[in-house]
Image (cartoon, rainbow, N blue to C red):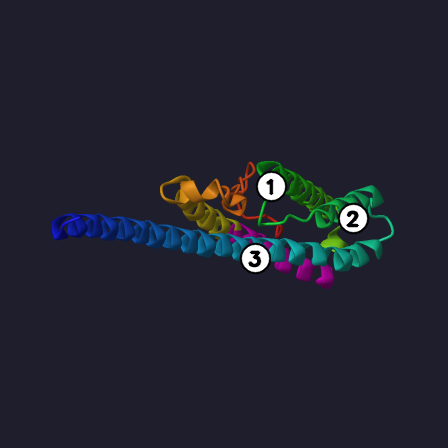
Amino acid sequence: MNNKGCFGIGTIGLVIIGIIALIGFWAFGAYNGLVAGNNEVQKKWANVETVYQKRANLIPALENTVKSYANFEKSTLTDVIAARAKATSINIDPTNMTEADMAKFQAAQGELTGALSRLMAVVEQYPNLKADQQYLNFQREYTAIENSIRTETVYYNDSVEKFNNSAQQLPGSLLVAFFTKFAAKPVFKASAGAEKAPEVFKQ
């Protein structure tokens, strides 16, 4: 084989090596981008769980305050306690959460929201309880936490949108076929009336 032929084969080999290297760098960058996005989603989800847990942690103090009023409608308080138990029993693994997982979590949290709303509506009929300092403290903390829930779920959805865009567009979509942990994540869907702040300070 003459020198010209060897040079041609060598050039083709270098081109192939260059293409393989480019594909490797391309895949490496895409993978790292998905890892970073996935970690961000998990962090934001942890923040969502934290604020919901803070809300659940308010219930025992509320229970003790309400129980001190003998004539209070106990069934309403029982509903809150049961809803809290259900809401805190649902845990989601953010690495492989599904739409069904998210729907189950939101449904349970929605039940607790509804039970708390009904209890606070009943409290309006009890002036002494309504003016109780412990109950007023609960109201303040509850309002602050509900606002935090709205904020953290928006942050979570933003991180999911960015991650899903990366996972569903090239080159990320090619990697998802090999790494299921990079599958699209479910968003947190706002319930009816979620855009309104809780009205718990009626006078």
Taking depth in this image into account, of 13 and 25 the one nearest to the observer is 13
- Which secondary structure, mark 1? helix
Mark 1 highlights which residue?
102
Q: Which residues are magenta?
A: 131-152
Residue drawn at x 84%, y 54% as measured from the top left: 67
Q: Position of residue 42 (x, y in %)?
A: 54, 54
- Which secondary structure, mark 3? helix
Neighbourhood count class around disc 2 (C-alpha, 10 Å): few under 14, some 14–19, many 20 upward: some
Residue type indicated by callout 2:
Ile
Residue drawn at x 41%, y 54% as measured from the top left: 33
Q: Position of residue 23 (x, y in %)?
A: 33, 49
* Residues at circles 3 and 1 in contact by the CB criterion of under 8 Å: no
Mark in front: 3 vs 2: 3
* Residues at circles 2 and 1 in contact by the CB criterion of under 8 Å: no
Q: Position of residue 192 (x, y in %)?
A: 55, 36
Q: Residue furthest left?
A: 4
Residue drawn at x 62%, y 36% as measured from the top left: 100
Residue type indicated by callout 1:
Met
- Give the alpha-carbon distance from disc 3 to disc 2, as whole Å: 23 Å
- Give the alpha-carbon distance from disc 2 to disc 1, as whole Å: 22 Å
- Give the alpha-carbon distance from disc 3 to disc 1, as whole Å: 15 Å
Q: Quadrant of residue 119?
A: top right
Mark 2 highlights which residue?
81
Residue type indicated by callout 3:
Asn
